Image: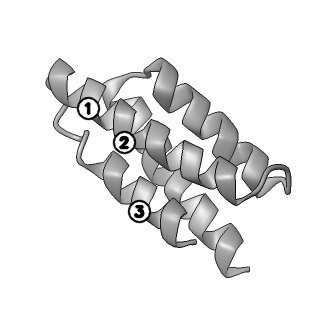
Amino acid sequence: MVYRRALEEAYAVARAVELSCGSTPELGEALRLIEDLASGAGGPEDAEYAAALLRQAADVLRLRGCLDWHLLPQAADILEHA
């Protein structure tokens, strides 16, 4: 239950950044992985990979000048601590 809630929170934050800043390949892949995790597919290594992708997407969006980039590392932290 707590794990699912954490996945939903990370997904919501990442999706909000995508809507605000636009997508990147890293962000799109991370969102897909989180969806898979929420449906029961994947494991801890997939959550770690999704967190790494969110951090990479944050770097890309920061360089683009998006002000909401800082939310993606927070979403990554949520995944890592779930």
Q: Amino acid at mark 3?
A: Asp
Please, is residue 69 above or below residue 29 in the view? below
| Residue at the disc numbered 3 | 77
**Element class at badge 1:** helix
- The residues bearing labels 3 and 2 have C-alpha atoms spaced at a distance of 9 Å
| Residue at the disc numbered 1 | 59
Q: For the point 19% across and 30% down, which residue is it? A: 62
- The residues bearing labels 3 and 1 have C-alpha atoms spaced at a distance of 15 Å
Q: Amino acid at mark 2?
A: Arg
Spot the residue most to the right. 40
- The residues bearing labels 1 and 2 have C-alpha atoms spaced at a distance of 7 Å
| Residue at the disc numbered 2 | 55
Position of residue 53 in the picture relative to residue 44 (left or right): left
Mark 2 is surrounded, within 10 Å at the Cα level, by few (under 14), some (14 to 19) or many (20 or more) other residues, namely many
Instruction: Please state the horizontal and vertical placement of residue 16, each as a whole percent of the image.
Output: 42, 43
**Element class at badge 3:** helix
Q: For the point 31% across and 27% down, which residue is it? A: 21
Please, is residue 47 above or below residue 77 in the view? above
